[in-house]
Image (cartoon, rainbow, N blue to C red):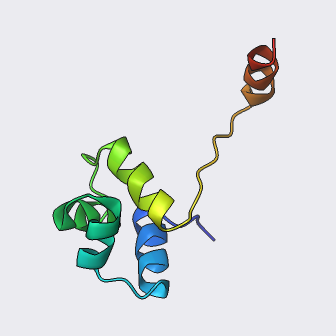
Amino acid sequence: MTAPTLGTVVRFHRERAGLSRRELSDLAAVGQTAIYDVEHDKPTVRLSTVTRLLEVLNVSMRFESPLMAELEGSARR
């Protein structure tokens, strides 16, 4: 099974929240076209747009890599 795309996650959470694209755009202060673009996995979407949508939908992002433990250790110093 493959992981869902960002667009699939956003659309799923928007629909489960009972929000139209217009309602979500008002809450997140982004355009409806931007939501369409995210939900259709367009590669030109701004990260700031994505983070606004995820915040409104109560979805968090997590960064993973083999080097994250090293980065987290250096941040504590």
- Residue at x 81%, y 11% (from the top left corner): 77
Residue at the image point whose x is 17% and y is 64% from the top: 33
Residue at 73 percent across and 29 percent down: it is 68
- The foreground one among 67 and 50 is 50
Q: Residue at x 40, y 65 (%)?
A: 7
Q: Looking at the image, which residue sits at the far top?
A: 77
Query: Residue 52, position in %: x, y?
Result: 40, 54
Relative to 72, is 27 above or below? below
- Total marks in image: 0
| Residue situated in front as seen by the camera: 43 or 58 | 58
The image quadrant of residue 71 is top right
Q: Quadrant of residue 15?
A: bottom left
In percent of width and height, residue 74 lies at: 77, 14
Depicted 21 relative to depicted 60: above or below: below
Q: Nearer the viewer, residue 22 or 34?
A: 22
Q: What is the quadrant of residue 69 in the picture?
A: top right
Quarter of the image where the N terminus is located: bottom right
